[in-house]
Amino acid sequence: MQSPQTVVATPASPVETIALDVTGMKCAGCVKAVEKQLTQHPGVVSARVNLVTEVAVVECEAGAIDPVALAEQVTEAGFPTQPRLATKTGEKAKEALSPAERHALENRQQLRQLVIAGVLIVLSAMGHLNQHFISFPAYFSPLTNIWFHWGLATAALLFPGRQILVDGWRGLRRNAPNMNTLVALGTLTAYTASCVALLFPQLGWECFFDEPVMLLGFILLGRTLEQRARGRAAAAFQALLALQPKVARLIANPTAAGSTPRAKGNDFGGIEIPVEQVRVGEWLRVLPGEQIPVDAEVVAGQTTVNESMLTGEPVPVVKQPGDSVAAGTLNQSGAIAIKATRTGKDTTLAQIVALVEEAQIRKAPVQLLADTVAGYFTYGVLAAATFTFLFWYFIGSQLWPDVTMLSAVGVESHSAMHAVMHHASGMGGETPPLQHSALLLSLKLAISVSVIACPCALGLATPTAILVGTGLGAERGLLIKGGDVLERVHHLDIVVFDKTGTLTTGHPVVTDYLPVGNFLPEILLQLAAAAESGTTHPLAEAIGEEAHRQELTIPTAEEFYTEPGLGVSALVEGVRVLLGNADWLTQQGISLSESEQNQAQQLASAGKTVVYVAADGQLAGLIGVTDTLRPDAKATVSRLRQMGLRVMLLTGDRLEAARAIASQLELNPDSDVLADVRPDAKAAAIAQLQAQGQHVAMVGDGINDAPALAQADVGISLQGGTDVAIETAQIVLMRDRLLDVVKSIQLSRATFNKIRQNLFWAFAYNTISLPVAAGVLLPTFGLVLSPSAAGALMAFSSVSVVTNSLLLRKSLSTDN
């Protein structure tokens, strides 16, 4: 989902994407401010900012924006930003910390912040404990002295609280107040009022220096716990980044004489170079225990490769010459030589990293309400705090005069107050009586309102859940391309499966070949194999394999032509040969006799795909091909139906063959089967279901499925499918296992439920806590929140949202 703050470029303008690393964001209001800064820059089309990953993705007119200048603009707004540059771009890239270095630095900062928060909370609590619970020995008296607490409050504001105060002031000055603005106003107001009480004891006011100290302590503690939880949420993605190899071992052509790699011995040779310098077509050597540096083809040697980082499948895969290997996978047992086929951003691992990172940026539409609220949240809280002060000062204290007696509850100890009185009398003045001031009560309630409000929870609700969900999916070979996909999965009604290569193994075999007229069976198979040699369709491969199995010579063919979804034609030794379905032959003027139609009907009724073969304008014969169901196809359909989803079959095969497959899957052959559907009509079939008010997922793997995948509310592609199908789909199953369709839907549903839980908690927390902090329970029940208690609750709200997102991993831990 794009930010509402959008500047639209002209339709003809080419668009490029810029990624920025943004720091300093504390809440959803900060996200809104950064998006506003980005979208106001000339040439920017849209901007999406993620609070958890601290990444901004900016779409802009190609060549119209300097990333460095854009980053400087955001930095000037109070959010230190730098472009995410490739390592080869020069010095600026070298200045950026690696993920490991940044993680170590954050850990040190969090530990220091945790210690400071703990010290502040303990020392500021001693006054309260001494008053209400514990009588400290005499040697603790300096720690309960009013001047000590004044010094502690002053030091807390000048040092650990300085960044909060400065950032809060910057936000207010730029007309973009944030959570730090609210905390800064609360702490400074409490500190100032206490200083007035200390310096002018004759007023009889209370001192509550402990409140700003404890408030800052809880804020720091909450943010530390929140950062650690966010780090855990991002752990899966960081682990994915760590899988990217850094170096490769370049060698000479291993297939040349004398250069074949040896699996034994120590003379492995080669020159180590940075992996980004490897070019397509170069040869590399990979030793046991090393990661494959790039996507490549094995040209020499044999080994087993652990591909679990891509597929989630722990069983190693045997690799030998001619097999493909992917970057980041682990070579386990033997030394191999490989030929680079894809490098850099084109490797499978790099594409997965890019997909996961993009998924973490894309927001769920349900977040729109939270984003809208966050944009005005701080202003609303400031208004509420002002209203609270005015109400209690002018109205509440008059309506309920006894409530001012509660103004000392939860604040500075009476012993500290007596110290102030004693200080006043020691200066020659009389000790004034303690005044229960309506002003102080109004201030405390206004401070509590400003502090307890929490836009952080709203800002963290969606990105933390998406971060955990997409990271967990990547670990299990499920690539979910964004929060918007999660929401669409949640609303699904129907799952439509392509048949060939999706529900079936995609490796059909020839079962029958029935010649017509004077054609011999061997001649029929030779002509069919020759005509199909110009295509890679599974049916063509099946016919070719059968010809090779029978050791038949395949004639030379030329002038190939393919009509997707219908058939092919080719010139085989001067004879025009046509292969395809009945419609294809009819279009070419080939007629079918009644007996031939009956033969085709019998094959189709047995669940076989019928391929018609014609030569020189006459039918030459029929070939029956069958494709067995995947082993997990029936279990997949059954579990989807148990989840309340309707399952349908969509195929270009004849209705009889489709019904035979449907019966094996226990689907209704009349209502759940869409057969004889041409590739260009598959998308229309999906659209027709959507027009009936249904939310539809399409599962496919081929080029023919791409339009339907794009049309569906959710497109699901198997990794074994074509690149265009994978690119079009919103969910990619890396393990090429059909049961992962079920797992991807379960994960999507669970993640979206976490988002809804987080948003409910964030809204409910603010809906309940703000009135309580404003004193709504004070007249009737005598309950009032001190500013420090409000700060603790605010910190708890953010931590609880992140923790709830982390529970997603636990709730799905029993899944395979």
Image (cartoon, grey):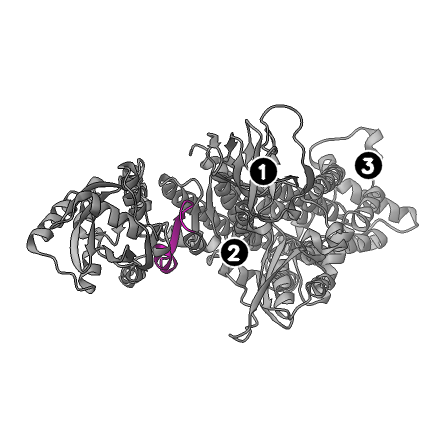
In the image, which disc is placed on residue 398?
none
Q: How far apart are marks 1 and 3 (CA)?
A: 82 Å
Image quarter of the C terminus? top left
In this orientation, does residue 320 appear? yes
Residue that numbered label 1 is attached to:
256
Residue 713 magenta-drawn? yes
Sequence-first disc among 2 and 3 = 3
- State how far apart marks 1 and 2 are (Cα): 49 Å
For residue 532, side relative to residue 410 (left or right): left
Left or right side of 613 for 219: right
Q: Dot 3 lies on which element?
A: helix
Tag on residue 143?
A: 3
Residue 107, percent from left and from top: 70, 39
Where residue 305 sits in the image (x, y, percent)? 51, 32
Tell me whether circle 1 and circle 3 mark residues in contact (CB < 8 Å): no
Query: How dense is the environment of label 3, judged by Cα within 10 Å: few (below 14), some, or many (20 and up)?
Result: some
Closer to viewer: mark 1 or mark 3: 1
Q: Which of 778 and 189 is in front in this view?
A: 189
Is residue 267 or residue 64 the one in the foreground? Answer: 267
Residue range corresponding to the magenta coloring: 705-722
From the image, tell me which residue sits under label 2. 362
**Label 1: element kind:** loop
Residue 772 visible in the shown view? no
Q: Is residue 5 above or below residue 427?
A: below
SS under mark 2:
loop
* Residue 87 magenta: no
Extreme residue in the top direction:
265
